Amino acid sequence: MTDQNGTIESHPLQHGEEVEVYPPSDEFRAQANVRDSSVYWQAAQDPEAYWAERARQLKWSKPFTEILDWSNPPFAKWFADGELNVAANCLDRHVAAGLGDRVAIHFEGEPGDTRTLSYAELTHEVKRAANMLTSLGVSAGDRVAIYMPMIPEAVIAMLAVARLGAAHSVVFGGFSAESLRARIDDAQAELVITADGGYRKGRVSALKPTVDDALALDTGTPLSVERVLVVQRGGNEVVMQEGRDLWWHEEITAFDGQHEAKGFPSENPLFILYTSGTTGKPKGILHTSGGYLTQVSATHSDVFDLKPETDVYWCTADIGWITGHSYVVYGPLANGATQVIYEGTPETPDWGRWWSIIQKYGVSIFYTAPTAIRACMKVGRQVPEQYDLSSIRVLGSVGEPINPEAWRWYHEVIGGGKAPIVDTWWQTETGAIMIAPLPGLTGLKPGSAQVPQPGITATIVDEQGERVGHGQGGLLVVQRPWPSMVRTVWGDDQRFIDTYWAKFGDQYFAGDGARFDDDGDIWLLGRVDDVLNVSGHRLSTAEIESALVEHHAVAESAVVGAHDDTTGQAVVAFVILKSQQTLLAPEQAEVELKQHVAAHIGAIARPRRVLVVSELPKTRSGKIMRRLLKDVAEGKEVGDTTTLADTKVMSTIQDQLRAG
Ligand code: PRX
């Protein structure tokens, strides 16, 4: 088997299975940012020296002399006595280096409107916004909630908050009023930055009205928000509350672009980003400044082989997720990259939209999620084949394991059979890429994230925390602290310890299963806890279950992630209705409860199916056996039922579902 750029070798994977390997082409290797494999062992010999060297590529207003402080595990401090301004590293630094005219952002709105912002223009806008936020009372140590569509002001708002040494909490625009309010309450945000609405699938999705609903909720926590700043985007009707709500475009006119960026300590909080865990309450993942910026910029350069002078980079993630933070905002801008930001969905007005954007801007590095690739595969290669995608030289994948079939399609149809694909494993908690090929060095294996980055010691262990051998599976851990690691769960140090460190003591437990193949490459196998991954987005079974039981008609619920060919997993809920209730007929239950979950959490959590049952399978100690429900939801033969308190429950459920 060969491709355009050389031989694809076959390698034994495990148990005699063969997997093809795509070595880097000679041309790619010769120009790669990282082309000497000695970087791995050099970094391994002294990881702290390696990261210090990478950190020194940033601009520090006060250089650090300490590298890692791990005297109080698991609370790490990186470069703690250094000071820097994160926003100035992403902006002013490049302008000062004479790069002010370089395009920072090619913005493409879903309706087709466009805007180009050079580094000088973006810097100017962020300075003005920083002055505006200062006038609204924002200063170092504060929290600002951001609930925005994918428009330049979202990036400007994040950088303006960072410039002032305050922390942002970006909430994905698809989350409900209730989810937004829970995040505002937890972080005690004083300001919300939003937009009237944003374009999605040809319509305006209302954001400001959701903010109004969120702030009007009676949550039992006194409202921390004093002001709401509203960007005009959707043109939808909104109500502005006197004394609280302000239009961004009106306020900003009073401020010029003079703003001196002050240095803040390396461990100053940069942002809180909420993510689903195994309980009903999302965790506020706290990231800080110097270590985070070091690792996102280093990995963005190494893994994507970024050439800031010539590349046009595009990551399709929304800023509401960690990928948007690290690989739309901070990594690319710290590296002086030119990037595309697109507001809308890939199918608007048709499935050619992404490919037309790649053609229009000459995108050379493209980073997206397997779920999107599978959706495009379903539509068919005839769509991308109508566009000139020859500018593409590196492809990336993130969010879930990429199945080899989707990998090969991505490689051939989007990458022209030559662009390397970097499958990047990481998490909200890790802040930056941890396991991924380096495209100038690694022979690529479809479906595997393969190797820890230089300076990262990720491995696979058994239940006792002992490293497993090649060809064996276990749990993924990170053994040494890394610069962009989560610092704590906001306001809950104990939860931070319990979730990530209680299992193995000094090793970070990621919550993912993984295996080494016979060559020692890492294959990710999915979550081992009650976290679902739908379209590369994390959802918690417990959070959806508690939303369901909040419905007046629901007595009990159990949620599982069933395999889905496009989205990876899909939410399937089993519910028992209250026996006395008369408000919800079982035949209406599915529609109403799907809607109920979407309204409580957000549309991403809407179950694909809601199945009404009379009993749930439980162990003798009362624990719901989700594994069995997952089998049913996937239409598989139901596994071992011997530990059930009532072994007949599963056949009852199956009979009910067949009858229904
Ligand atoms: O299960 C892993 C999966 O996504 C989880 C992290 O989700 P989140 O914090 O939302 O961040 C997603 C974007 C970084 C992980 O625990 N995951 C992420 N990337 C991969 C992956 N699974 C397999 N391969 C990947 N490349």
Image (spheres, rainbow, N blue to C red):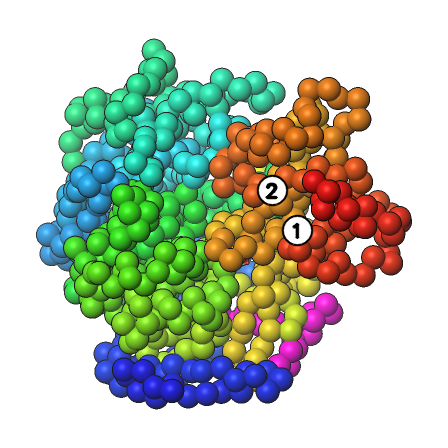
Foreground of the two, 362 or 47: 362
Q: Compared to 575, does 53 lie above or below?
A: below
Q: Specify whether 421 is left or right of 650.
A: left
Q: Compared to 380, does 213 lie above or below?
A: above
Q: CA distance from mark 1 to mark 2?
A: 9 Å
- Callout 2: 10 Å neighbours few (<14), some, many (20+)? some
Q: Compared to 356, does 151 lie above or below?
A: above
Start-end of magenta stretch: 455-472
Residue 183, disc: none
Residue 293 at what x, y percent from top left? 37, 56
The N terminus: image quadrant? bottom left
Residue type indicated by callout 2: Arg
Residue at position x 43%, y 66% from top? 406
Q: Is residue 476 visible?
A: no
Q: Is residue 552 magenta?
A: no
Residue 633, disc: 1
Residue 585 at what x, y percent from top left? 69, 25
**Of callouts 1 and 2, the N-terminal one:** 2
Residue type indicated by callout 1: Ala
Residue 87 at what x, y percent from top left? 29, 47
Main SS of the magenta segment? loop
Residue 137 at what x, y percent from top left? 35, 25
Q: Is residue 456 magenta?
A: yes
Residue 609, disc: 2
Q: Is residue 252 visible?
A: yes
Q: Secondary structure at mark 2?
A: strand
Q: Specify whether 491 is left or right of 535.
A: right
